[in-house]
Amino acid sequence: MKKQLILVTLVALSVISCSKKNNVPPSSKGYFRAKVNGVFFSDSTSASISQGLNPMYGPLETLITGHYNNGTITLKLPSQVTAGEEPLAQGTQDAIRINENSGSYFFAGFNGINGSPVQGSGKINILESTNTGANSFIRGTFECIAPVDSTRGIILPPISITEGEFNLKWQ
């Protein structure tokens, strides 16, 4: 009988210790990471979520930003973020924007600079978004092939982002 009780206790402890919550620990901002052209990066210090605001109309968009060695990646979403996959199709406002330190700009989805849809493909998948005070966070994945913004007259190969993921605390 003691052996069975010990076995049940060990199994219960292992199940409890293996389960994990998806929310960001209270002491952490979270992370933003991906592979850019096959090179992995992770940003857990300057990654952020913000909302673009218009004083007359309120929130316009949600911006999720992470930094890598060559620049910044920004995921642009509607002001109200809901769970689900968002393909970056022409005609939508969703976009992935890459600003390189060299001054080159790459887009997949909607080009917010001149307001026109651009070439490129990808998706942003919001897995979970909570708004519960101090424990509010957003978690998801993203990927894209983003061509250079051709309105600047620069010819560069497109940037490929794979295995992108984020889990960030609302500030």
Image (tube, helix red, strand yellow):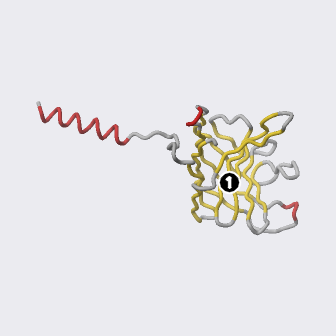
Count of all numbered marks drawn on residues in the image: 1
Q: Residue at x 13, y 36 (%)?
A: 3
Residue 127, above or below 71? above
Left/right placement of residue 155 relative to residue 14 reads right
Quarter of the image with the N terminus is top left
Q: Which residue in the protein does label 1 denote?
A: 144
Q: Residue at x 88, y 52 (%)?
A: 114
Left/right placement of residue 84 relative to residue 57 reads left
* Secondary element type, mark 1: strand
Quick one: 14 or 49, which is closer to the camera? 49
Residue 78 coordinates in the image, percent (x, y): 74, 38
Residue 9 coordinates in the image, percent (x, y): 23, 35
Residue 149 coordinates in the image, percent (x, y): 82, 60
Q: Residue at x 19, y 37 (%)?
A: 7
Quick one: 8 or 28, which is closer to the camera? 28
Kind of residue at disc 1: Cys
Residue 4 coordinates in the image, percent (x, y): 16, 33
Q: Which residue is outermost to the left?
A: 1
Residue 115, above or below 6? below
Quarter of the image with the C terminus is top right
Residue 137 picture quarter:
top right
Left/right placement of residue 114 relative to residue 83 reads right
Q: Estimate how packed mark 1 is, as few (under 14), some (14 to 19) or many (20 or more) residues with alpha carbons within 10 Å.
A: many
Residue 146 picture quarter:
bottom right
